[in-house]
Image: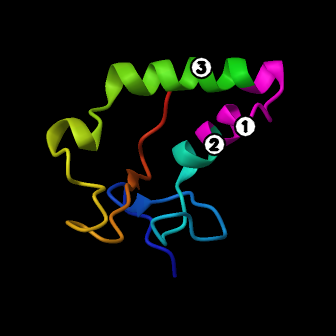
Amino acid sequence: MPDSSPDRLIRWRGTRPGKRQVRPGVFALVNGLHKADLLTAEETAFRAHHNAWFDRHLVLPTDVDPTVYDHHVNPGAVAWFRASAAPP
């Protein structure tokens, strides 16, 4: 039975491992599509709007610890979100 606690953590990720041998999360996936110029104008606007919200409200893990995603220091490190978290 799934945990329905508001403190439950969730992660959206790809189906195949990336260069660090972990499945990339939603930000890496969307940013990769953007860099490859594979998003429509509407999807690009959606990405920009929501990235701006996240930039205003969340601390980047690498701002706290620059080595957090360093494969040699923390192999397999990934980010999770509280299930109760939601942008407006």
Report how far apart the C-alphas of labels 3 and 1 lie in the structure. Answer: 15 Å
Task: Give the foreground label among 3 and 1.
Answer: 1
Front one among 61 and 70: 70
Mark 3: few, some, or many residues within 10 Å (few <14, many ≥20)?
Answer: few
**Does the magenta segment cover residue 14?**
no
For the residues labelled 2 and 1, say whether their Cβ atoms are less than 8 Å apart.
yes
Report how far apart the C-alphas of labels 2 and 1 lie in the structure. Answer: 6 Å
Report how far apart the C-alphas of labels 2 and 3 lie in the structure. Answer: 14 Å
Region in magenta: 31-43
* Residue indicated by mark 1: 36
Q: What SS does tag 2 mark?
A: helix
**Residue 60, labelled with which disc?**
none
Mark 1: few, some, or many residues within 10 Å (few <14, many ≥20)?
Answer: few
- Name the amino acid, label 3: Ala
* Residue indicated by mark 2: 32
Residue 17 percent location from the top left of the image: 57, 70
Residue sitting at the far bottom:
1
- Please give the name of the residue rendered at 44% of the width and 52% of the height, measured from the top-left corner: 83
- Please give the name of the residue rendered at 52% of the width and 63% of the height, measured from the top-left corner: 19
Q: Which badge, 2 or 3, comes first in the chain's sequence?
A: 2
Front one among 87 and 28: 28
Q: Which badge, 3 or 1, comes first in the chain's sequence?
A: 1
Mark 2: few, some, or many residues within 10 Å (few <14, many ≥20)?
Answer: some
Front one among 64 and 35: 35
Above or below — where is 28 with respect to 71?
A: above
Residue sitting at the far left:
64
* Residue indicated by mark 3: 48
